[in-house]
Amino acid sequence: MRDNAIYFHSAPVGKKIEILAKNPRCCVEVDSSDGPVRSDNPCRWEMRYKSVICTGIARILEDYREKCAAMNCIIRRYGGPEYPFSEKEIERVCLVKIPLDGMTGKQYGY
């Protein structure tokens, strides 16, 4: 996430990109679970979790510099260094930016 937006990369063609091209309004959900909250009765077990849902309007990036910035944002998220992508490298990937207009979250069992 950077500048209140989520970035992701994808193959340039496929179902996800077709759907976003037709209707860019979307949501992204991220969940984390740390196992069950146990009870004496297994029918009463519940899951310990954290969940975030973000909403926004997806935009498929076309500009070379903007695509490089988005790809490096993703790489930095995982601890990688800035990388000087060539135009040929960046052409092979679809990068999507979702500026967020809403975010909700919840957790249970912590």
Image (cartoon, rainbow, N blue to C red):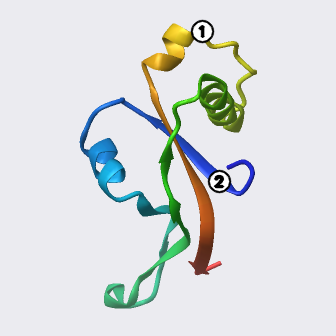
> Crowdedness of circle 2 by 10 Å Cα count: few (<14), some, many (20+)?
some
Q: Nearer the viewer, residue 85 or 28?
A: 85
> Crowdedness of circle 1 by 10 Å Cα count: few (<14), some, many (20+)?
few
Q: Residue 7's quadrant in the figure? A: top right
Quadrant position of the C terminus in the picture: bottom right
The residue under label 2 is which amino acid type?
Ala
Res. 32 in view: no
Q: Nearer the viewer, residue 43 or 27?
A: 27
Which label was assigned to residue 5?
A: 2
Image coordinates for residue 19, horizontal then vertical, percent:
29, 52
Q: Is residue 74 left or right of residue 62?
A: right
Count of marks overlaid on the render: 2
- Picture residue at 60% right of the left edge, 9% below the top: 86
Which label was assigned to residue 86?
A: 1
- Picture residue at 34% right of the left edge, 59% below the top: 23
Q: Secondary structure at mark 1?
A: loop
Q: Are marks 2 and 1 in contact (CB under 8 Å)?
A: no
Cα–Cα span, label 2 and label 1: 24 Å
Q: Is residue 27 left or right of residue 70?
A: left
Image coordinates for residue 54, horizontal then vertical, percent:
55, 67
